Amino acid sequence: MTETQKSATLSLNGETYELPIFSPTAGPDVLDIRKLYAQAGVFTYDPGFTSTASCDSTITYIDGGKGELLHRGYPIDQLASKSHYLEVCYLLLYGELPTAAQLEDFETRVTRHTMVHEQMHNFFRGFRRDAHPMATLVGVVGAMSAFYHDSLDVTDPWQREVAAVRLIAKLPTIAAMAYKYSIGQPFVYPKNDLDYAANFLHMCFSVPSEEYHVNPILSRAMDRIFILHADHEQNASTSTVRLASSSSANPFACIAAGIACLWGPAHGGANQACLEMLKEIGSVDRIPEFIARAKDKNDPFRLMGFGHRVYKNTDPRAKVLKQSADEVLELLGVEDNPLLQVAKELEQTALNDPYFIEKKLFPNVDFYSGIILEAMGFPTSMFTPIFALSRTVGWISQWKEMIADPQNKIGRPRQLYLGETMRDYTDIEKR
Ligand code: ACO
């Protein structure tokens, strides 16, 4: 971040204030208002952070106009086609693509941490079987702070590193356990000879009574879904992790906070909501009815899997996933699936509708990921846990970046207060 010669001048109550301007390596200039309150006695107002940079970062860059997503400078479509998830994790965490030796070491460290403390199996048994796997995930990941006491000290870089590897390694195990628990099947231990994505499929779909062979096309598609969800700049859940950890709370508690935020249907919960919407639509002839509802100002219904706060042209992740969806559906021989017919027709109708064109609404990553995951055999309730396990590396990378920053301060927004001014307490009999 370089402070430029440029500055903005604010005139307020007969005084002028110079606001320095920072020039990022990419993206729009940023006004520095950190001293504004001290100098001018005013706050800025920006609910939803639509014009506010909450931190500086070197991890991920999005150009919403161009539909561009870069991790450490590398375009997401190149990473999705040439790399694999653990290599992308290394890139996000450490800033550069690994050498062969560095990658081998990292993969070994992650693989050796995939098992969870055996006592955690009992912890699962306290949940109802019909609990949503996200509810279980929030609880169990938060509870990791009760099991891994030797990686809670955020001031120790080594403990931070161990916590990072533990979280990346154990999230697939915990997500798979949440699934197995919900369907009443025994937990499946991780297998170290499988890669990250294949191991997750094995823990979700194998049973002790028979051999399970992971289809390489499906594990590749799974790995691609992991890559495409790995990080996304300062979105709601990542900002939640940063805000939670700005108080120096332990990493497991902070990631649990991120998972809670991700769960909402306006964020990671959209993949489940999207598939449920496609099921509700049910057949192609009902599409006009739902499009009309989405456009009706008096109806809260929105087309799930459409629109994005930052992308206003195309979601580059959706482009890659659309191709993956075609491959997976062809492999599984389900191209004629009625749900898929509804999805394809809905996409075309919305993309050609003036309302969606004018508001720049097009399919986002959640539109296609749900279709692929459904075809793979995951229930809709597992879609958001899969997003959460993929995003864990992004949350952790952003958390590590923030903790290591000497300028790190507790996050403490201010407010525009519109409530009552001071008044005297009224005794109950006089109200
Ligand atoms: N269907 C119908 N209309 C929509 C949709 C939609 N999916 N999304 C936005 N709009 C309309 C809004 O009604 C609004 O119209 P108005 O200007 O007439 O009031 C306009 O488009 C702008 O929408 P906002 O909600 O102001 O845009 P915002 O940037 O705040 O929201 C969001 C982005 C939350 C993603 C929104 O598009 C949405 O709710 N989409 C559906 C949920 C979804 O798919 N979420 C996943 C996001 S991607 C992710 O988290 C991985």
Image: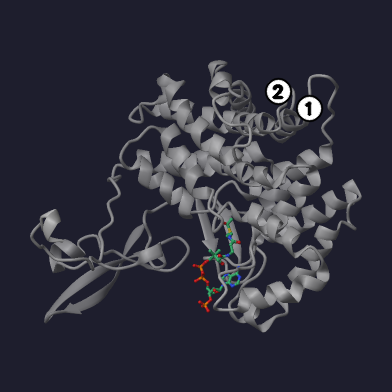
- The quadrant the C terminus occupies is bottom left
Q: Which corner quadrant of the figure contains ligand 1? A: bottom right
In the image, residue 421 lies at what x, y percent? 14, 66
In the image, residue 119 lies at what x, y percent? 54, 16
For the view shown, which residue lies furthest in the top direction? 118
Identity, as a three-letter code, of the amino acid under mark 2: Val
SS at mark 2?
A: loop
What is the spatial separation of the Cα atoms under label 1 and label 2, in whole angstroms?
A: 7 Å
Residue at 58 percent across and 28 percent down: it is 170
Identity, as a three-letter code, of the amino acid under mark 1: Ser
Please say if the residues under marks 1 and 2 sit with CB atoms less than 8 Å apart. Answer: yes
In the image, residue 198 lies at what x, y percent? 75, 33
SS at mark 1?
A: loop
In the image, 232: left or right of 176? left
Residue at 64 percent across and 27 percent down: it is 104
- Please rate how many residues cluster around mark 2, counting C-alpha atoms within 10 Å: few if below 14, some from 14 to 19, many from 20: some
Disc 2: which residue: 188
- The quadrant the N terminus occupies is bottom left
Note whether 227 is above or below 422 in the view shown.
Answer: above
Note whether 79 is above or below 61 in the view shown.
Answer: above
Disc 1: which residue: 206
